[in-house]
Every structure is written in C-alpha cells, then in structure tokens.
Amino acid sequence: MARAIITGGAGFLGSHLSDRLLAEGYDVVAVDNLITGNTDNIAHLASNPHFQFIEQDIIQPYTVDGPVDAIYHFASPASPVDYLELPLETLLVGSVGTHNTLELAKAKGARFLVASTSEVYGDPTVHPQTEEYWGNVNPNGTRAVYDEAKRYAEAVTFAYRRLYNLDAKIVRIFNTYGPRMRVKDGRVVPAFISQALRGEPLTVFGSGTQTRSFCFVSDLIDGIYKLSVSDQSGPINVGNPTERTMIQFAHEILKATGSKSEITYLPLPTADDPKQRNPDITKARTLLGWEPKVSLEEGLGSTIEYFRTKLD
C-alpha cells in the first residue's frame, strides 16, 4: 500500500485530499500545526486504520517514521484574513516549510507536489492566465506575504528537481469552494453564504466588477490527484474557467439561498486586489485529461447546506 504525507492535512483542501487518497488505497499521514486547520475536518477519519494525524509545525525540521511514497505540501494560511494576521508565519511556511518538506521528500525518495496558487499571477495583465505568464505581483503590498511565499515555493521546488532529480510537481490552484470552509474564512464564498443565511447585507468590495472563477472542491482534488500520478511536472493551472463578476456571484448566492438580503458596497481592503482572475486550463485538459464537472448550482447546494449546519 502506498503511503502519502499531506502537510496542512487538517485544512479545507488537505482534508478533502486525505479523503481522496484514502479512497485510492493510500495510507495517509496528515501533518498540521492547526494554526488555520481544524481537527473537525478530519474527525470522520479518526477511526480509519489507514489514517494518522500528527500535530507539527513544519517551519521546524521534521520527519515521519517509515517509508513515504508521496508528499503533498498544502500547509499555508490561504485567505487574506489569515495571511494579513499571520504575515511572518505565511512567509516562513512558504519558504522554510517548503524547504523542510522538500528535504523530507529527498530523504524518503518520495514524489513531491506543492500547492501553489493563482496569486502568483498577482493583479494580472494577461487574461485568462496561462502558466507561461510571469505575473504582476506587488512585492511590497500587504498581499505579498502570500504571493511571494508561493512564488518562492515554486522556485525552490524546481531547484530541488534540477539539483537532485526529485520528482517534484507544481499545481496552481484557483478559487475553490465547498464544505469544510470556515465561516469566518474571509473569502467571498463563505462570506456571502453566511451573510445571506443570516439575512445580513452581502458586502461587495470595490465596484463589484472584479471577476473570479469558482471551482468545486471535488473537481479541484481530482485535478490535483491526476497531476500527482502523471508524468507532468507543471506548473499546471487547476480551476474552473467560468468567470463571474462579484455582483453576478452575489445575486447567484441570493438565489441559491432564497435570501432577501441586500447588497452593500465597501472600499477594497487592499490596493492590489486582483481585478480579474480566470485560469487557462488548456494544459490540464490536454495533459491530464481533466476539466471541472460540477456545476455552480450543484456545488453551491452542498456548500450552503454545510454552512446551514455550522450556523445552526
């Protein structure tokens, strides 16, 4: 039986990845310091003999006993609320934490996949964003602690690939939503859904004409898994290419929840908030045979039900 480590394994994406790898027949070791992760996300796996949880801060050098076949590096604060409150932790997990995890992969002879992000494109001047685009990142802005940490994580991953012939891969993740997101995550999906369910005004930042593309979590995890077992190294974009403005998305949330909430407008929290975000997934389609399948209506249905239980 293959054995995999997932850093950030108690987080939103890490916990769903744990489910997928267990379903594929892996033994899974989830490593998380719980700074933004939550053991509630993996509570349903506690009795599974093929699952193990280790509370560990990967900014410190660490190891895991026994053989390891694959390492999925997902540890990082991932929402603006988190990385603005935890700027140094975000920088360190993307740099030192990635280095420590690559060292573990090298020592174990394991293949390695790092979760990068569409944020490496910054406030893009190329649309949609292809993997060849180098990005438009403000290195001194408040978002830079996350953007530059991920850009560094990509650079050090490929340095290990070139120096040590490590089987290392990069996935660039675009906006993803689904059950197990935190109510106070700060990102638009949990914010809009929780506001709508509470009957509060939906807060749209800026003009509301900025765009995002939303991928349901099961689709995203499928793309990540296909990349991890392929002969491709990436970087490869994984996300849903259907683009929506924030105003359009707010109205879709109101329709899906049946809420009578109004929409209010607030100033943008940071000057370098991306104005548009949309993945070119040509490589994922042609090299991995992957594309998203879950409609927004279907994905929002299960996500809204999850939030109803949390808010109740």
Image (tube, rainbow, N blue to C red):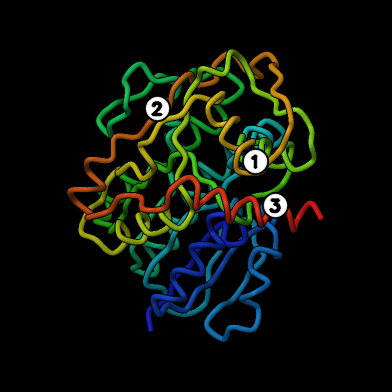
| Front: mark 1 or 3 | 3
- Displayed quadrant of residue 213: top left
Q: Measured along the vertical axis of the image, is residue 130 above or below residue 89? A: above
- Tell me where residue 214 appears, x and y as whole percent: 47, 40
Q: Earlier in the sequence, mark 1 or mark 3?
A: 1
Instruction: Judge by depth and name the residue closer to the eye, 275 or 58.
Output: 275
Question: Residue drawn at (17%, 48%), measured in percent from left and top?
Answer: 286
Q: Earlier in the sequence, mark 3 or mark 2?
A: 2
Q: Which residue is mark 3?
A: 307
Secondary structure found at label 3: helix
Q: Which residue is mark 2?
A: 121
Question: What is the distance, in whole Å, between disc 2 and disc 1 at their CAs?
Answer: 21 Å
| Front: mark 3 or 2 | 3
Farthest residue, direction left? 286
Secondary structure found at label 1: helix
- Tell me where residue 140 appears, x and y as whole percent: 55, 17
Query: Looking at numbered disc 2 in the image, what kind of residue is underneath it?
Result: Tyr
Q: Which residue is mark 1?
A: 89
Q: Quadrant of the N terminus?
A: bottom left
Q: Is residue 194 left or right of residue 226?
A: right
| Front: mark 2 or 1 | 2
Q: Earlier in the sequence, mark 2 or mark 1?
A: 1
Crowding at dot 3, Cα within 10 Å, few <14 / some 14-19 / many 20+, comes out as many
Query: Looking at numbered disc 3 in the image, what kind of residue is underneath it?
Result: Phe
Question: What is the distance, in whole Å, between disc 1 and disc 3 at their CAs?
Answer: 28 Å
